[in-house]
Every structure is written in C-alpha cells, then in structure tokens.
Amino acid sequence: MQIFQLWNQLNTKKLAKLLSQTVALGVGAIVLFSSNNADAAEQVILKYGDFQGPISVQELNQFAETGKTTPTLRAYLQAAQQEPALARKALKSGIKADRTFLNNLLSSWAGPVLVNQIGEVVHPPAGELNQQALRTALGESIKQNGEVTLLGAIQNYPSNSVELEGDRLIVVYERLSNLAENF
C-alpha cells in the first residue's frame, strides 16, 4: 500500500511540474508571437544637415497616416524648411506590386540598388548602412502591406533607433518613384 501512495505522490508531482512547464511554455509563446516587430525601431533621429533631433516612430507614423504633427515634429519641419505635405508623401508613397514580385526584385540585380537608395535616407545612427538589416525591414514592409515605402523601412528596421536623413528624403523619394514607374 505504501508503494501505491508513493507512486501517486510521484505522479502528482510530475504532473504538476509538467503542467507548470506547459503553462510557462504557452505564456512564452503568446508573448513571443503576439508582439509584432519586437526588434523594430522605436525612435527616429531626424536629421537635416547639422540639425538633428529624436522623435518616436509612433509620431512619424501618425504624421504619415493623418498629417497631424506633434509640436516637436512641427518644429523640426519648420527648422528644416520642409514642406509637410511633400515629406508625408515621400514617407508613404512606395513601390506597390505583388509580394512575390517585390521579394524577387529585392533578390535581383535591382535589389542592392533599391536598398542603397533607401539606405541613403534610412540607416543606423552614426553608422554605415547595414544592407541585411534594411532588406529585413523592406521584406517586413512587403509582408505587411505589399509595398516598399520609406515609412515601412523605418517601422520595421531591426534596431531600437534609426536615422532619417530629412534633407535626402525628397530626392530619394523621386528616385524611387522613377524606379517604380519602370516596374
């Protein structure tokens, strides 16, 4: 009889341990899979020549989607003498196409050209362009909305912060627009 009671206690402890491990694994999976872009940029260092200042990706996204500016962003745009409507258009406009086509484009001879063009505007703070990180950001942008945009590259950049060369924004936008017309 003692052996049977001991066996039940062991099985209960094993079951409790297995159950707690399963719950922990489930909670971990939920946290992992429910957090979109856990490694995505949260802050943008907006640069215009020698001037630079931080804004959140959320502020930049709000501006691009609605046209509403925060006092900080408004001050940056005014200091840079940047037309808000044109900057907004440059952030949102992109190359729209089938996801497979865009992924193939990134893998073709045009991929490095596209990545370098966008890398002139979006890159790590005070660092050289990380082509793989930018490709990852562009791939995520394509996955989310089927297009390559500067805003998508910023939102999905796999780093806590990213620099946005505001004085190059319009020039690169025009180049991307010309590139998009050829596809």
Image (spheres, helix red, strand yellow):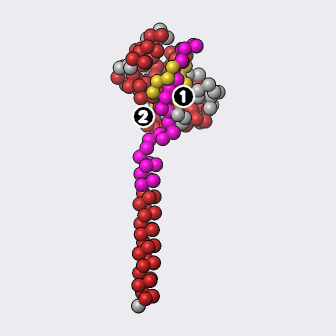
What is the crowding at mark 2: few (fewer than 14 residues within 10 Å), some, or many (at least 20)? few
Residue 132: x and y in percent read 61, 36
Determine the residue positioned at 45% across, 53% down: 28
Quadrant including the N terminus: bottom left
- What's under tag 1, amino acid-wise? Val
Residue 64 percent coordinates (x, y): 40, 23
Taking the image as shown, residue 65 lies to the left or right of residue 41, namely left
Percent position of residue 127, x then y? 63, 27
Which residue does the numbered mark 1 point to in the structure image? 162
**Nearer to us in this view, 182 or 118:** 118
**What's the residue at 41%, 51% (across, down)?**
30
Give the numbered dot on residue 145: 2
- Name the residue located 44 percent from the left edge and 83 percent from the top edge: 6
Question: Where does the magenta region start and end?
Answer: 27-52
In the image, residue 32 sits, relative to residue 170, either above or below, namely: below
Task: Name the element at disc 1.
Answer: strand
- Residue lying farthest to the right in this orientation: 128
Reply yes or no: does residue 29 show up in magenta.
yes
Q: In the shown orientation, is residue 49 left or right of residue 64?
A: right
Say what amino acid the circle numbered 2 marks: Asn
Secondary structure beneath dot 2 equals: helix
* Residue 117 appearing in the image: no
Camera-side residue of 139 and 179: 139
x and y percentages locating residue 107 in the rendered image: 59, 36
| Image position of 98 with respect to 70: above or below | below
Q: CA distance from mark 1 to mark 2?
A: 21 Å
Please indicate, yes or no, whether residue 1 appears anywhere in the rendered image: yes
Choose mark 1 or mark 2, whichever is in front.
Answer: 1
